[in-house]
Amino acid sequence: MKINVIGLGYIGLPTALMFASNGMRIVGTDSNNDLIIRLNLGKLTFDEKGLEELFQQALEHQISFTNEYEPSEIYIIAVPTPYIKKSKQIDPKHVISAVQSVLKVAPPGAIIVIESTVSPGTIDRYIRPVIRESGFEIGKDIHLAHAPERILPGNMVFELTHNSRTIGSDDQTIGECLKKIYSSFCKAEIVVTDIKTAEMTKVVENTYRDINIAFANELAKICNRDHMDVYEIIKIANKHPRVNILQPGPGVGGHCISVDPWFLVGDYPDLVNIILTARNINDEMPEYVLRRIREIMKANGIKDISRIGLYGLTYKEDVEDTRESPTLQLLEKMDEHLAFGIKSYDPFIQYTIVENQYFDFDDFLSEIDLIVVLVAHSHIKENSHKLKNKIIFDTRNTLSVHGTYKL
């Protein structure tokens, strides 16, 4: 069986490699020519635990990389799904474009699987019309399914294998066929349901976490005002068997939790209250961190912003993924306020993405008085002994250095 995986980013590439490593004939397609060249040279395009080993296994089987779409029995589409800033609704242009390209080469009876996260009803509103307008009969010429990804950068290979999956399909037989194919590598439960339920389930998962984080962030603000330790309070509260509060932080990043809830805000503006409030709370956290930095500077007599260093540019610990990074959001806020000169460092980012970015940790430390820890990389824990003479603002509660400021 031949599978054409469309979109070789953080989701598509590991998925393609996993299928290939488990005996499927895979063609990986992406519009980025440099990415395709690199993969054909046997080089990965991003670093991820266990991915190099998986890549080598896949190369021993039937896998190829190209800019072209190829005739295949199954197409798996894993392209970005951003939202429109003004309306907060999904922007389906990448998915639509991929489907249109697939239809030019798809043989009769081909299955198109959308892995990209989409808002509930997206496939009904945008994908079905594209297929019908192209002259195909859905359920006969083309079969549709939705199998939303459920993996986390930093642990992708493990989670592809061990996380449960959902497959939405118009036809139970097609759903069961896909379940069998995905079970070639997925050892957890695979649930087959209808397409719209699968769409909603994925968005709900990320929205739940967003709301939980917003609750923790609001607690952090309350506790800071009244001089209470929010981390101790959360730890004690979580001892209750039915309480599981997540940790506060400087904001929410990545392409899931920070994006997916907006789909519901955009599609159901008259119904969302908690969801919208949670999104606003989490989006405001970089601004809150800036206010805390100002308070700490005042308390310590620091007047020069260039003596402040931001540690961490990625959106989470021990990955190189900067999508929707709270640190980058914070820097945008500073730019809006004409505040320039603040320094930054991230051990996982070895190319310039912002001004005043350092690539040597010791050089970075030598130029600052206050370090703001925005990402809990293992690196900062391993090098905490170098921070003895620094003022520390730890937004991730990752260091146990006496006198450290917290959220």
Image: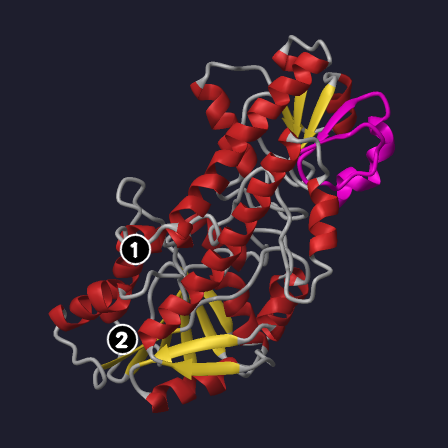
Q: Pinpoint residue 171: horizontal percent, then vertical percent.
A: 30, 87
Q: Pinpoint residue 123: horizontal percent, then vertical percent.
A: 27, 67
Can residue 367 be seen at all in this image of the molecule?
A: yes
Q: Which residue is mark 2?
A: 106
Q: Pinpoint residue 18: horizontal percent, then vertical percent.
A: 56, 72
Q: Residue at x 50, y 44 (%)?
A: 323
Between 309 and 217, the residue placed more toward the observer is: 217
Can residue 71 be seen at all in this image of the molecule?
A: no
Q: Residue at x 47, y 20 (%)?
A: 335
The crowding category of the residue bearing disc 2, from other C-alpha atoms within 10 Å (few below 14, some 14 to 19, many at least 20), is many
Q: Residue at x 46, y 55 (%)?
A: 36
Q: Which mark is residue 126?
A: none
Is 6 in the magenta?
Answer: no
Q: Pinpoint residue 108: horizontal percent, then vertical percent.
A: 24, 83
N-terminal-most mark, 2 or 1: 2
The residue furthest front is 226
In magenta, the rendered stretch is: 378-407
Between 248 and 136, the residue placed more toward the observer is: 248
Q: Which residue is mark 1?
A: 271
Can you say whether 14 is above or below 324 in the image? below
Between 400 and 157, the residue placed more toward the observer is: 400
